[in-house]
Image (spheres, grey):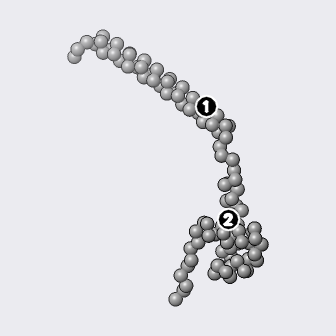
Amino acid sequence: MPAERRHFTGAQKMAILRLHLLEHVPISEVCQRNGLQPTAFYLWQKRLFEEGAALLERPAGRSSRGADARQTEALEAKLREKNEVLAELVTEYMAIKKEMGPL
């Protein structure tokens, strides 16, 4: 019967990676201490370096807020224009209805 798979939390993975990356403990020793295959260690390390950059990115700054503000303004202008057209159509409809009188 195969051994049950172990699942490490994100904090546990970071602690294991930290042993090698910051404390310079050899990978073989880190893996042996934690009952981990070296391939899993290298996979975690790869993900850390690939996805870690996203954590260090600057949050959306003013340029993004400015784009959002411009988009909001454009949408509001479009909505105002639609409301004006609708008001004009309702006014025309009411005028035609008055001209026709009761049915």
Q: Single out the residue that lies furthest toward the top.
A: 99
Question: 85 or 96, which lies in front?
Answer: 85
Position of residue 17 relative to residue 69, above or below, is: below
Which x, y percent locates residue 85? 46, 21
How far apart are labels 2 and 1 at the CA level?
Answer: 37 Å
Query: Which of the two marks, 2 or 1, is nearer to us in this view?
Result: 2
* Dot 2 and dot 1 residues touching (CB under 8 Å): no
Q: Which secondary structure, mark 1? A: helix
Q: Amino acid at mark 1?
A: Arg
- Bin the neighbour count of mark 2 within 10 Å (Cα to Cα): few under 14, some 14-19, many 20 and up: few
- The quadrant in which residue 50 appears is bottom right
Q: Label 2's element?
A: helix
View extreme (left): residue: 103
Between 52 and 100, which is closer to the camera in this rendering? 52
Residue that badge 2 annotates: 47
Residue 65 shows up from this direction? yes
Q: Residue at x 54, y 26 (%)?
A: 77
In the rendered picture of this protein, how many numbered marks are placed on residues?
A: 2
Q: Quadrant of the C terminus?
A: top left
Dot 1 alpha-carbon crowd within 10 angstroms: few under 14, some 14 to 19, many 20 or more: few
Q: As displayed, is residue 86 above or below residue 39?
A: above
Side of 26 where 75 appears, left or right: left
Residue to which mark 1 is pinned: 70
Q: Image quadrant of residue 36?
A: bottom right
Q: Position of residue 58 (x, y in %)?
A: 69, 47
Residue at (68% x, 63% y) in the render: 48
Q: Is residue 83 above or below residue 20?
A: above
Residue at point 69%, 70% (across, down) = 17
Residue 87's x, y, as percent? 42, 20
Res. 54 mark: none
